[in-house]
């Protein structure tokens, strides 16, 4: 239901080329929709949590960007220039030819946007930040936006992501001297669906506020996730 609603809403998006935050929001919405579909395909497997984790990551980044939308979205979008510069430098170091037109185009982009990503005191041949966020970590975003998603489902999913003993241990059971691995987990499935539900709706809220999709009433009617968490209920599949 929510995924179908998001798909219908996304079809009405109209973007202006100079609207960096609108472009970023639309791309994040499309990606969240793809991830939500992947979770539907994976549940009840534990790996659904890996996809839900990246949905939470994306939501935090989008919400953080929205606080200073013009500047931060310009940094996000223009970081493609830094990616291209690094690729060009690698090709040149390894002796691969780079078309002169590409080098000139990249130099023009760096002249316009390079200062947004430049490290204050570079001590290497690469003077730019490693990411468009300029050193701001996801935990920093959680501190300013609210840590509920970060401290609960994100961290739990992270142990499975990073091969932690808890994540792997929870998939193991022993019977008659044999170890059995269970790839499924109802708890992870439930949390993944709830996280996907919340991430998709909040991304839609950002898109609606900035791109005037006219769906506020529909979003508000769908926001029942808090009751699921507080009541401890197993939710219906909210994305169908």
Image (spheres, rainbow, N blue to C red):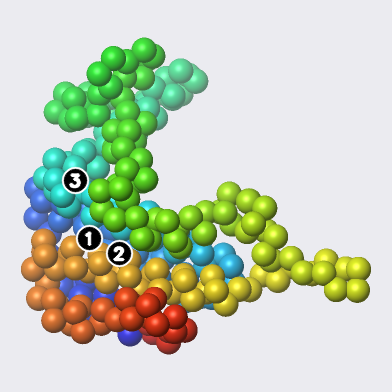
Q: Position of residue 148 (x, y in %)?
A: 36, 60
Front label number (2 vs 3): 3
Rounded to the nearest angstrom, the CA distance separating label 3 from label 1 is 12 Å
Q: Is residue 155 visible?
A: yes
Residue 25, position as x, y percentages in the image: 21, 57
- Residue 108 vs residue 182, the one in the foreground: 182
Q: Which residue is mark 1?
A: 26
Pick whichever, 224 or 109, lies toward us.
224
Q: Is residue 193 shown above or below 143?
A: below
Quadrant of the snapshot with the C terminus? bottom left
Q: Earlier in the sequence, mark 2 or mark 3?
A: 2
Left or right: residue 181 versus residue 196 is right
Quadrant showing the N terminus: bottom left
Q: Which mark is residue 30?
A: 2
| Crowding at mark 1 (Cα within 10 Å: few <14, some 14-19, many 20+) | many
Q: Quadrant of residue 63?
A: bottom left
Residue at 64% x, 57% y is 166
Helix, strand or loop at disc 3?
helix
* Labelled disc at residue 73: 3
Is residue 101 at all visible to an observer of this figure?
Answer: no
Identify the residue at the far right of this view: 177
Which residue occupies the foreground of this view, 113 or 222?
222
What distance separates the C-alpha of mark 1 from that of mark 2? Answer: 6 Å
**Label 1 element class:** helix
- Say if mark 1 contacts mark 2, CB within 8 Å: yes
């Amino acid at each position: 239901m929510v995924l179908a609603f998001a798909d219908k809403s996304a079809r009405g998006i109209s973007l202006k080329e100079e609207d960096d935050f609108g472009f970023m929001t639309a791309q994040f919405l499309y990606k969240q929709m793809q991830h939500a579909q992947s979770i539907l395909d994976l549940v009840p497997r534990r790996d659904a949590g890996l996809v839900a984790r990246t949905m939470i990551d994306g939501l935090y980044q989008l919400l953080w960007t929205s606080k200073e939308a013009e500047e931060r979205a310009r940094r996000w979008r223009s970081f493609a220039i830094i990616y291209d510069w690094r690729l060009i430098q690698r090709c040149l170091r390894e002796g691969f030819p780079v078309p002169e037109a590409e080098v000139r185009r990249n130099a023009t982009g760096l002249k316009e946007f390079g200062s947004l990503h430049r490290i204050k005191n570079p001590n290497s041949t690469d003077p730019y930040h490693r990411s468009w966020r300029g050193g701001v970590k996801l935990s920093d975003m959680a501190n300013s936006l609210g840590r509920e998603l970060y401290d609960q489902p994100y961290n739990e999913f992270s142990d499975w992501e990073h091969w932690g003993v808890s994540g792997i241990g929870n998939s193991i059971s022993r019977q008659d001297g044999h170890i059995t691995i269970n790839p499924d987990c109802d708890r992870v499935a439930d949390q993944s669906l709830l996280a996907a539900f919340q991430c998709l709706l909040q991304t839609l809220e950002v898109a609606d506020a900035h791109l005037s999709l006219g769906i506020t009433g529909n979003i508000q009617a769908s926001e029942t996730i808090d009751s699921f968490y507080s009541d401890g209920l197993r939710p219906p599949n909210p994305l169908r």
